[in-house]
Image (tube, rainbow, N blue to C red):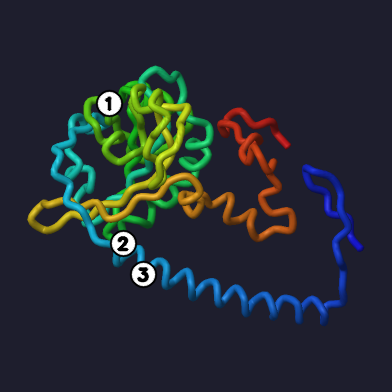
Amino acid sequence: MAKLITRTGTKDHRVVSPEKWLAARQALLVEEKKFMRLHDRLKQKRRNLPWTKVEQAYVFEGPDGKETLAELFAGKRQLIVYHFMFGPDDTEGCPHCSFWADHFDSAGLHLPQRDTSLVVISRAPFKKLARFKRRMGWKFKWVSSGGNDFNYDFHASFTPEDIRSGSVFYNYAKSTMGMEDREGASTFYREKGGAVFHTYSTFARGIDLLNGTYNFLDLTAKGRDEHPDHAQDWVRYHDKYRTP
């Protein structure tokens, strides 16, 4: 037996011969392929969802001044929006959204080749976003929705009245909420004539696929090795980690 050290302690882990390991790996591969086929069908169902037309004339403030939602597509047909938790009164962006955002610049190198733009949107004033972005060294486009209802309309932000009511609509269900912003991602399609459609949104664990670090860790023996009740208590801004 080998000793596997995790945050909850040390446990024994089975060690076998290469032949037995190969047999076990081949058996798991059958399950992995089945899961992949199921996932492929799920992704097709996601693409088959009906769309809703975006009628509201949202205007955002960013590095290129005032821009409409259609202009954020930057000439592409598809737009991915990450709803980043950074409220008007916050001095820093959410550290957990920052964890996700650390992966965006690399994706931005390739998404345009698939007719897709990526933009991050928060309610904080653009000056705050720009200052925090410089500190983090990010290059992706980040705009402020502080002058419109975009975040509220797409259920990533909530009014104080909604929070006090104890019934906030988030992740497609009513629940209590102790904060004014939550994480999520929304996708849009722009027709040749300029019409914009909302095609998909996902929240909470639904954004895990956007986090490359988690996808790497899921391949390892320890996995994510997180606290079961406080999964991301280890996460820091990347300029605050201690050198290992």
Q: CA distance from mark 1 to mark 2?
A: 30 Å
Please give the name of the residue rendered at 18% of the width and 43% of the height, measured from the top-left corner. 71
| Residue type at tag 1 | Gly
Whether 91 is drawn above or below 35: the answer is: above
Identify the mark nearer the N-term, 2 or 3.
Answer: 3
Q: Amino acid at mark 3?
A: Gln
Whether pointer 1 and pointer 2 mark residues with C-beta atoms closer than 8 Å, the reply is: no
Q: Residue at x 80, y 43 (%)?
A: 8
Give the alpha-carbon distance from disc 2 to disc 3, as whole Å: 17 Å
Q: Quadrant of residue 121?
A: top left
Q: Is residue 11 above or below residue 234?
A: below
State the quadrant of the C terminus. top right
Which residue bears the numbered disc 2?
Answer: 114
Residue at the extreme right of the image, as rendered: 1
Q: Residue 169 location in percent, x, y?
A: 37, 39
Horizontal and vertical percent position of residue 68: 17, 38
Label of residue 27 in the image:
none
Q: What is the secondary structure assignment of the residue under circle 1?
A: loop
Q: Which residue is mark 1?
A: 146
- Earlier along the polypeptide chain: callout 3 or callout 1? 3
**Is residue 48 depicted above or below 142 in this figure?**
below
| Amino acid type indicated by mark 2 | Arg
Q: Mark 1, residues whose alpha carbon is within 10 Å: few (<14), some, or many (≥20)?
A: some
Give coordinates of residue 10: x percent, y percent. Answer: 86, 49
Q: Nearer the viewer, residue 71 or 63?
A: 71
Can you give x and y, in whole percent of width and height, for residue 99 in the image?
53, 39
Give the residue number, with chain letter if any, for mark 3: 44
Judging from the image, what secondary structure is the residue with disc 2 in?
Answer: helix
